[in-house]
Amino acid sequence: MKKWYEQLFENYSNTYDKEFFTQGTIGECDFLEKELNFDKSKTILDVGCGTGRHSIELAKRGYNVTGIDLSENQLQKAREKAQNAGLKIDFIQADAREFSLGRKFDFAIMLCEGGFSLMETDEMNFAILSNSRKHLKDGGKYIFTCLSALFPLYHSVKDFHDKNLLDGTTFESNFNIMTFRDYSDLEFTDDDGNKHRVDCNERYYAPSEITWLLKTLDFRNIDIMGCDIGIYERGRPLTTDNYEMLVAAEL
């Protein structure tokens, strides 16, 4: 039986690009370029690249990017967009928990969860971090976002999503403070207009957990920041109002 995230992204690429959280690409890539020191020689791995919005924007700016994603439907859209933009980007269908590309990168990104936080167990989520680390060169940098456990302790996850849902989408939430997991019912409409319902299971992380996981993998200079869609910047404190946290770490 397919997992909820496989069902959701089986035929959702056009709709995905309309989601509110996909609208901040330019600002997010501005931040990434600063983190790259505008060095076009740096190679970039985009983990959970989806329809390729960050990969494509970075490639437009002259960077060498490789994107991986579990969903072939999302990747087909990414390839189509890249071709229309006259870009050559290697988009690869792969599971972030266990892929092996046979090469290492200077820089890895995993934004808007990119698979991390969506897995059914903490071990699976950790496998994504661990496998990404294996694909980084010594001195490499990892930039990713994840769901912040501080947010649902002070706010309603359902209210947050209800403000931003596309037409034809409903969301019911049940956040467990013991496991920091949100178990939700999501009803959505796919690209062909068909209605679906999936049982979601997403893991929210405390900053101290992320720091410990990254230290376990020998990352250093770990910086955790608050962020909003399209607004990534160093020095921005993480608060209880941030739905996601932005993480930067180095090897």
Image (spheres, rainbow, N blue to C red):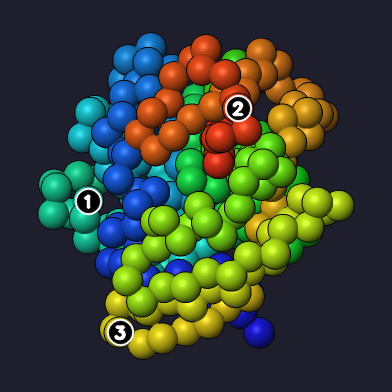
The kind of residue tagged 2 is Thr
Residue toward you, 242 or 222: 242
Question: Would you name the residue on which mark 3 appears?
Answer: 193
Give residue 19's quadrant in the image.
bottom left
**Element at badge 1?**
helix
Residue at 62% in and 46% down: 155
Q: Residue furthest bottom?
A: 194
The kind of residue tagged 1 is Ala
Residue toward you, 88 or 181: 181
Residue at 29% in and 84% down: 192
Q: Disc 2 and disc 1: Cα gap in Å?
A: 36 Å
Where in the figure is residue 195, as x and y percent of width and height? 41, 86
**Sequence-wise first label, 3 or 2:** 3
Q: Rate crowding at label 3 as few (under 14), some (14 to 19) or many (20 or more) other CA atoms within 10 Å.
A: few
**Sequence-wise first label, 2 or 1:** 1
Question: Would you name the residue on which mark 2 appears?
Answer: 239
Q: Rate crowding at label 2 as few (under 14), some (14 to 19) or many (20 or more) other CA atoms within 10 Å.
A: some
Give residue 225's quadrant in the image.
top right
Taking the image as shown, residue 123 lies to the left or right of residue 98, namely right
Give residue 13's quadrant in the image.
bottom left
Tell me if label 3 and label 1 are in contact, CB under 8 Å: no
Q: Is residue 128 at least partly visible in the picture?
A: no
**Element at badge 2?**
loop
User: Any mark on residue 27, and which?
Assistant: none
* 4 up-or-down from 150: above or below: below
Where in the figure is residue 60, as x and y percent of width and height? 21, 35
* 48 up-or-down from 172: above or below: above
Front position among marks 3 and 1: 3
**Element at badge 3?**
loop
Front position among marks 2 and 1: 2
